[in-house]
Image (cartoon, rainbow, N blue to C red):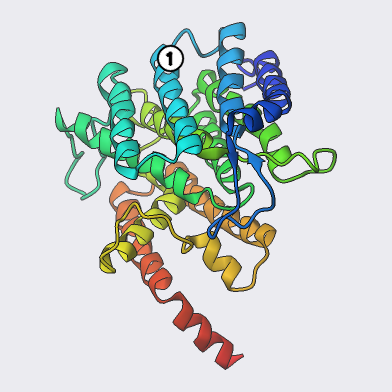
Amino acid sequence: MFDYLQIVPLFTAFFVALILLVVMTPLAHQFGLVDQPDIRKRHHGMVPLTGGVAIFMAVVVASIVTDVWMKNNPLFFTASAFIVLLGMLDDRFELSAKGRLMCQFGVAAIMAWSAQNYITSLGNLFAVGDVNLGIGGYFFTIVCVVGVINAFNMIDGIDGLAGGMSLVVLLAVVCLLLLAGNDGAIMEPLIIIAAIVPFLAFNLSWKGFRGNKIFMGDAGSMFVGLTIVWLLVDHAQGGAAAFRPITAVWLIGLPLMDMAAIMYRRARKGQSMLRPDRKHLHNIFMRAGLSSNQALVAILFMGSLYCLIGVLGEVFAVPEWIMFWGFIALLMVYSYIIQNIWRMIRKFNKLT
């Protein structure tokens, strides 16, 4: 690991992000790139939405200056630039959900078609051999990319959640790469981590960073979603794959399940599945009495358990079909609990 661990790119990403987060704050107010409180957003005052832009630019600068990542992934940065621009426009002008979705499909096509980073096999999910997708893998990948981007966008509802969940998943990817002996690839997720950490310092108002709250914005949540799905597909496919496709699904299992449960509930009520509301997992925790920080810790702990299951399944070579049906069973349990959470809480309160 230490032979491949390069400190300069990590320090570059960290300090560039730190500087940009400070420098871009007055610019955010000047150009109207700020988040104002409303019925869904209970924060105080106008908060800059420049966290995601700073993270992206820090990763770009670190990759160009140190030549660690950019030389091998120019199309990743092309797709990322488009998704960050889309997020900035959405943060500023509140684009329509359908328009935003169409643009996301275009970005996903860059990854699948142009970069040829797409899902060719789902693994042995049914105990009858690998499920190979052929040309259908392009279209399946595009749908998956859009799904993951929106899963991380939807989960970004309280301070530290999207950034913290990203760190959990990226650290799990680092762990799996090390276990697979693919040490040379660990700098990719580590550079993203290095850029996210200073953002979390401002976002969570760590000691020394209080009074300068910054939000990630749609630009940031969509960028980290794209980054994570890009890395997962890249390292879960091909002969040199570091982990199996079902392991990748477990790593992002909590954001996926939260999105699936929300969309299912909206569809049952005849509402648009893209309609925003205050019924996400973090909203449920807070309405149940937890503070924002307590909800953050609880959700990150849950996300870590999902990642741990994925990593342990890989380490102990648990059959893919067991991992797959275990995930489906947990998804059904999760969805049932979310749909009936208030009735279950009332019954619990009566018993106590």
Residue 175 location (% of width, % of height): 55, 35
Is residue 16 depicted above or below 347 in this figure? above
Is residue 261 depicted above or below 243 in this figure? below
- Along the viewing direction, whichever of 15 and 234 lies nearer the viewer: 15
Whether residue 101 sits left or right of residue 228 in the image: it is left
- Along the viewing direction, whichever of 305 and 31 lies nearer the viewer: 31
Image quadrant containing the C terminus: bottom right
Residue 85 location (% of width, % of height): 45, 26
- Residue 179 in sight here: yes
Is residue 168 depicted above or below 29 in this figure? below
Image quadrant containing the N terminus: top right
Residue 149 figure quarter? top left
Residue 73 figure quarter? top left
**Given the image, on which type of amino acid does mark 1 rest?**
Asn
Q: Secondary structure at mark 1?
A: loop
- Along the viewing direction, whichever of 141 and 60 lies nearer the viewer: 60
The residue shown at (36%, 61%) is 261
The residue shown at (59%, 28%) is 31
The residue shown at (33%, 33%) is 104
Residue 7 location (% of width, % of height): 70, 17
The residue shown at (46%, 53%) is 254
Whether residue 175 sits left or right of residue 269 in the image: it is right
Whether residue 300 sits left or right of residue 325 in the image: it is right
Residue bearing the label numbered 1? 73
Numbered circles on residues, count: 1
Is residue 176 depicted above or below 325 in this figure? above
Residue 240 location (% of width, % of height): 36, 23
